[in-house]
Amino acid sequence: MGLREYIGDIVEAVVTTAKGMRITARYGVDASEEVTQQYPEERREPDERFRGFLHNDIARCTSCTMCVKACPVDCISLEAVRGADKKMVLASYDINIGRCMYCGLCVEVCPPKSLVHTGGYEKASFDRGELILHFVHEDAEEIKARVAKQVAEAAAKAAETAKVAANPAAPAANPAAANPTAKEDPEKKG
């Protein structure tokens, strides 16, 4: 490598550095264009279609499991039992936001639209357990036991109703009242 090539490389490095610094200097000179935000004091408002943390309105949720099936990373888990009225009852609904990739597929397939993205984006934690969002705050086993009791009571009530409908009316205490066509014995009258 000759002296001419060496000096050419130095000149090229200076020219390309100057081009890059021209863009950077424009941000430093123009005070109206603010780029940096002082984060803890100034929080950025997310855009309207921002995909933040997931939230499920369990009052509207039908336990259809469409969100669980659509999730590509299996970060949603739900457990449901069939109630006395044949509808599904949520026993537990958890979302692991540490695994979620915020793709929005679960929100798109939710039939009652109970699952939505929120504007939340701050959830730093030292413990992975804190990254699991629990939406049913009652113990799953208690819910299952309560629903099983309701199902058993409904089955017993249905069985009793079927038994009453299947049996004819109970016979009356007075045989003449039970059979009105029977004639009275004339010897018993006198």
Image (tube, helix red, strand yellow):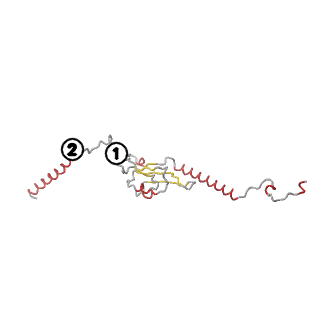
Q: Which residue is mark 1?
A: 45
Quarter placement of the N terminus? bottom left
Residue 107, quarter of picture? bottom left
Question: Residue 120's spot in the image, x, y percent?
Answer: 38, 47
Residue 32, quarter of picture? top left
* Residue drawn at point x = 46 percent, y = 56 percent: 111
Q: Left or right: 158 with respect to 177?
A: left
Q: Secondary structure at mark 1?
A: loop
Question: Residue 9's spot in the image, x, y percent?
Answer: 13, 55
Label 2 Cα crowd, 10 Å radius (few <14 / some 14-19 / many 20+): few
* Residue drawn at point x = 46 percent, y = 57 percent: 66
Label number found at residue 30: 2
Q: Residue flagged by tag 2: what amino acid is it?
A: Asp
Residue, far top: 41
Q: Residue flagged by tag 1: what amino acid is it?
A: Glu
Label 1 Cα crowd, 10 Å radius (few <14 / some 14-19 / many 20+): few
